Image (cartoon, grey):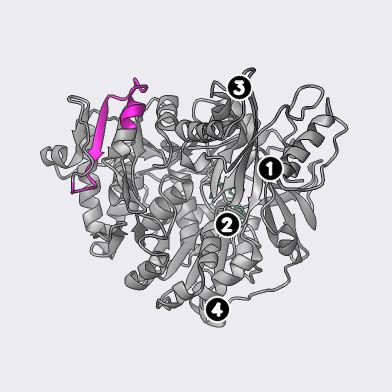
């Protein structure tokens, strides 16, 4: 059923082992009363209201939820400021000198910011934004390495009511320009560069390419990451400003804006089933409520924890579970700039040991790489500080789950496998570590107050078996729209079912115990190393090359990445396949999107399999790429195309 199945589906379906929470964990867990599930199910709005009341409101909300499908408003009438909730509130309430951000750069440089430090930095940055003319409601793009200044810049936007749009530093200049233009950002915050595997990624240089095509940008703010000046930065007079200089001229205090609960907090672009990424819109009150409540309950966060989510802030996991959720909950969080294998493949374990990490949240693709690198590496380090493990981004196969449990968790730590999406903003399906009996490979149950159904194609709920993952009631951190495209919002998420339920795009199965097993995307979205990439995006990048006539992109199961990108291309008349051209096409995709979308395999084909109405049948191409028996070809215009492709493919392998 799924267009793109994760590895080891069968292993997943055969999995029988269960892991109940230990008594010791349950005794002190933040959530240890099972009644929370029933209470929240009986009255979800009352449940979320109680969560929202733990935030600091400038004016209280009068209505929990207004639902005019597909448009929801949460905590209506309430006024608050996200930066105040993530920072000032803690400074005032006993966490002034607590470490908020413990940061380590890839070369080994370190910084710690207390909540007081963070407050000072956010205030200064907010005044810098204002001094450059940024106003409430303006969009600010960010193209940054994983350094504290990125979180500071996001919170500075929140403080003055500006909307941030963070673009992952691995995206290319063209991808950055497209995102800036889509939401008409007026300021870009970037850095000279960031470290990745020992070298500096020259972000400002890449941004300069993008800035040739972004007329809305009036100013550029450059954070100096690299003190060695090895990478000269070109400063365009009047437009570009060094942060460390301009910050000298601003006041220390910036009065926070009073924001409506439904004012936009940020835009984050993600891939969908068309060539154009979607600017997912998140607002303030519901988003903070959802991320804070889940951070506390799912990660069992306590005041003395050292919490580490390894995601880059450029993805939603970084927004919700590096920045907003943990800071709203008053956590001490670790941020690490670089690669897990730099300078050695035990960098993560040495970080955990050095900083005494207690909660560790990472992606299955990383776990599978660690498995391959061997158990000696974690065993060289004292990982006994860890008390809880998390997984996110793609289905975790039972083997990886068991390895994580045994070699990182020392068989004593609960694992929370958390399913959610850029669109959901917050964790939706997850164990609660003090309550849930886990099964390797299952995300188990919906979070309290979240209504999930697995439905068959007719829309009927499946009580046991496979179907499509559906969310049948609105939830606080849900997306409020796609920036500038209300029709696409309604069509993509809310029109699959007749009853205004949300269609997630994932396949799932529910077992006899009511545990949910995620089975991967059912649409044309790939998940490569936990990164979401649209097949159409890669196809548009390929056909943009002058030699290419047509392209079809499919995902192929990959032991470590989950999926890898396989492209089939036909060439224009007069063009001939060659290794040189293959390299060129890969390079072209990297230029259009970024290295994360580089096709692992490119196959030149004489024809692509199409239906009689001309639609490319990717399903058959995936069968070919995966070496499977070819499915039904009766709807093809020319069945010979597939046979030819298959024999050509097998000869190449
Ligand atoms: C997949 C990342 C299985 C899923 C937070 C979803 C998962 C997509 C899990 C969203 C999980 C995420 N188990 N699959 N625990 N978590 N996914 O928007 O296919 O980058 O639709 O958000 O990742 O990816 P996104």
Q: Secondary structure at mark 2?
A: loop
Q: Which residue does the image show at 30% across and 50% down from the upper left? A: 147
Residue on which the image places disc 4: 411
The answer to whether mark 2 and mark 4 are in CB contact below 8 A is no
Distance of label 1 from label 4 (alpha carbons)? 44 Å
Question: Dot 2 corresponds to which residue?
Answer: 560
Reading the chain from its start, which is encountered first: label 1 or label 3?
3
Q: Is residue 148 above or below residue 458?
A: below
Sequence order check: which comes first, mark 1 or mark 4? 4
Q: Earlier in the sequence, mark 2 or mark 1?
A: 2
How would you rate the neighbour count of disc 4 (Cα within 10 Å): few for under 14, some for 14-19, many for 20 or more? few
Count of marks overlaid on the render? 4
- Mark 2–mark 1 Cα distance, whole angstroms, equals 23 Å
Work out which residue is located at the far bottom of the displayed protein and give it.
Answer: 24
Q: Marks 1 and 4: which is nearer the front? A: 1
Using residue 345 as the reference point, say whether residue 515 is left or right of it: right
**Image point (41%, 25%), residue name:** 181
Mark 1, Cα crowd under 10 Å, few <14 / some 14-19 / many 20+, is few
**Residue 235 at x, y = what percent?**
20, 30
Q: Answer whether residue 45 is magenta in the image.
A: no
Q: Residue 490: which numbered mark, if any?
A: none
Instruction: Identify the residue under disc 3.
Output: 575
What's the mark number on residue 652? 1
Q: Which SS class for mark 1?
A: helix
225 within the magenta span? yes
């Amino acid at each position: 059923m799924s267009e793109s199945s994760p590895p080891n589906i069968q292993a997943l379906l055969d999995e029988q082992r269960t892991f109940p929470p230990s008594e010791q964990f349950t005794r002190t867990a933040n959530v240890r009363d099972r009644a929370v599930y029933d209470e929240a199910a009986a009255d979800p709005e009352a449940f979320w209201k109680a969560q929202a009341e733990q935030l600091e409101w400038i004016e209280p909300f009068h209505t929990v939820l207004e639902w005019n499908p597909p448009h929801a408003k949460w905590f209506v009438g309430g006024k608050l400021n996200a930066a105040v909730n993530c920072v000032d509130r803690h400074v005032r309430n006993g966490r002034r000198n607590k470490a908020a951000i413990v940061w380590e750069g890839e070369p080994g440089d370190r910084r710690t910011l207390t909540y007081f430090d963070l407050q000072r930095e956010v205030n200064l940055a907010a005044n810098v934004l204002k001094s450059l003319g940024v106003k409430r409601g303006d969009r600010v793009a960010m193209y940054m390495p994983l350094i504290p200044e990125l979180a500071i810049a996001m919170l500075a936007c929140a403080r003055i009511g500006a909307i941030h749009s963070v673009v992952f530093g691995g995206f290319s200049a063209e991808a950055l320009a497209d995102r800036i233009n889509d939401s008409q950002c007026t300021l870009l915050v970037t850095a000279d560069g960031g470290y990745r595997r020992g070298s500096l990624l020259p972000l400002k240089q890449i941004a300069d390419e993008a800035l040739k095509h972004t007329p809305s940008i009036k100013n550029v703010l450059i954070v100096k990451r690299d003190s060695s000046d090895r990478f000269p930065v070109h400063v365009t007079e009047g437009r570009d400003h060094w942060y460390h200089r301009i910050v000298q001229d601003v006041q220390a205090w910036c009065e926070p804006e009073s924001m409506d609960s439904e004012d936009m907090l940020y835009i984050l672009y993600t891939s969908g089933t068309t060539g154009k990424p979607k600017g997912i819109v998140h607002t303030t009150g519901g988003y903070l409520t959802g991320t804070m409540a889940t951070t506390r309950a799912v990660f069992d966060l306590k005041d003395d924890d050292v919490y580490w989510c390894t995601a880059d802030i450029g993805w939603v996991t970084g927004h919700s579970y590096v920045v907003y959720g943990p800071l709203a909950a008053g956590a001490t969080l670790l941020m690490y700039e670089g690669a897990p294998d730099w300078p050695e493949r035990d960098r993560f374990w040495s970080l955990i040991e050095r900083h005494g990490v207690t909660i560790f949240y990472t992606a299955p693709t990383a776990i599978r790489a660690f498995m391959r690198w061997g158990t000696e590496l974690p065993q060289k380090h004292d990982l006994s500080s860890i008390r809880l493990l998390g997984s996110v981004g793609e289905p975790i196969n039972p083997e990886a789950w068991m390895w994580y449990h045994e070699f990182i968790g020392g068989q004593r730590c609960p694992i929370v496998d958390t399913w959610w999406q850029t669109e959901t903003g917050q964790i939706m399906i997850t164990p609660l570590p003090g309550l849930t009996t886990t099964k390797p490979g299952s995300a188990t149950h919906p979070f309290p107050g979240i209504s999930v159904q697995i439905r068959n194609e007719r829309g009927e709920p499946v009580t046991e078996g496979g179907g499509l993952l559906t969310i049948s009631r609105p939830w606080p951190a849900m997306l409020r729209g796609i920036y500038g495209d209300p029709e696409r919002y309604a069509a993509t998420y809310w029109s699959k079912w007749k009853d205004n339920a949300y269609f997630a795009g994932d396949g799932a199965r529910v077992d006899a115990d009511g545990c949910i097993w995620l089975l991967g995307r059912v649409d044309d979205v790939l998940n490569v190393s936990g990164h979401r990439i649209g097949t159409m995006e890669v196809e548009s990048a390929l056909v943009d090359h002058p030699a290419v006539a047509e392209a079809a992109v499919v995902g192929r199961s990959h032991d470590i990445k989950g999926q890898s990108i396989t492209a089939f291309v036909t060439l224009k008349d007069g063009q001939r396949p060659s290794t040189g051209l293959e390299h060129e096409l890969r390079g072209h995709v990297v230029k259009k999107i970024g290295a994360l979308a580089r096709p692992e395999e490119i196959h030149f084909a004489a024809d692509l399999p199409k239906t009689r109405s001309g639609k490319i049948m990717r399903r058959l191409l995936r069968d070919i790429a995966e070496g499977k028996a070819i499915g039904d070809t009766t709807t093809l215009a020319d069945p010979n195309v597939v046979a030819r492709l298959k024999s050509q493919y097998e000869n190449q392998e």
